[in-house]
Image (cartoon, rainbow, N blue to C red):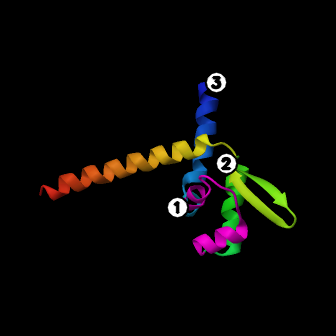
Amino acid sequence: MDNRKLYELHAQLCEAFTSPKRLEILNLLQDKELSVMEFIKLTGMRQSNISQHLSILREKGIVKTRREGTAVYYSLSNPKIIKAFNIMKEILKESIEEKDKITSKW
């Protein structure tokens, strides 16, 4: 695959990670599947807001769905997504800790 095309696809995928609410949704999906009602209970967000974020994540291929009766359950489409998610969290935590060390010396 051409690197330019790969960079374009990478950037498009990363667009889904620009919302703190979508990151919260991903965090909740780390090791389980959830229905919209479960997301509402866990996040306190409105159904329309949850549905909008899930739609974006599904469009980008980050989550997949499974229907059971009238309920739709969401899960990660690939477990490597959460690995990348957790690596970014680690980097951010380390960065914050480093900044805290520097500012505490002042």
| Tag nearer the camera, 2 or 3 | 2
Give the farthest residue toward the top.
1
Image check: 102 left or right of 82?
Answer: left
Q: Identify the element where label 2 is drawn.
A: loop
Q: Which mark is residue 2?
A: 3
What type is the residue that disc 1 sits on?
Answer: Pro
Q: Nearer the viewer, residue 66 or 17?
A: 66
The residue lying at 66 percent from left, 24 percent from top is 1
Q: Is residue 11 above or below residue 50?
A: above
Image check: 97 left or right of 79?
Answer: left
Q: Earlier in the sequence, mark 2 or mark 1?
A: 1
The residue lying at 66 percent from left, 42 percent from top is 78
Would you say residue 1 sits in the magenta stretch? no
Q: Is residue 85 above or below residue 50?
A: above
- How many numbered discs, if any? 3
- Label 1 sits on residue: 20
* 2 and 1 marks in contact (CB < 8 Å): no
Region rendered in magenta: 24-44
Q: Earlier in the sequence, mark 2 or mark 3?
A: 3
Would you say residue 27 sits in the magenta stretch? yes
The image shows residue 7 at horizontal and vertical percentages of 58, 34
Label 2 neighbour load within 10 Å: few <14, some 14-19, many 20+: many
Measured Cα–Cα span from mark 2 to mark 1: 15 Å
Q: Which mark is residue 62?
A: 2
Image check: 18 left or right of 52?
Answer: left
Measured Cα–Cα span from mark 1 to mark 3: 31 Å
Q: Identify the element where label 3 is drawn.
A: loop
Q: Earlier in the sequence, mark 1 or mark 3?
A: 3
Label 3 neighbour load within 10 Å: few <14, some 14-19, many 20+: few
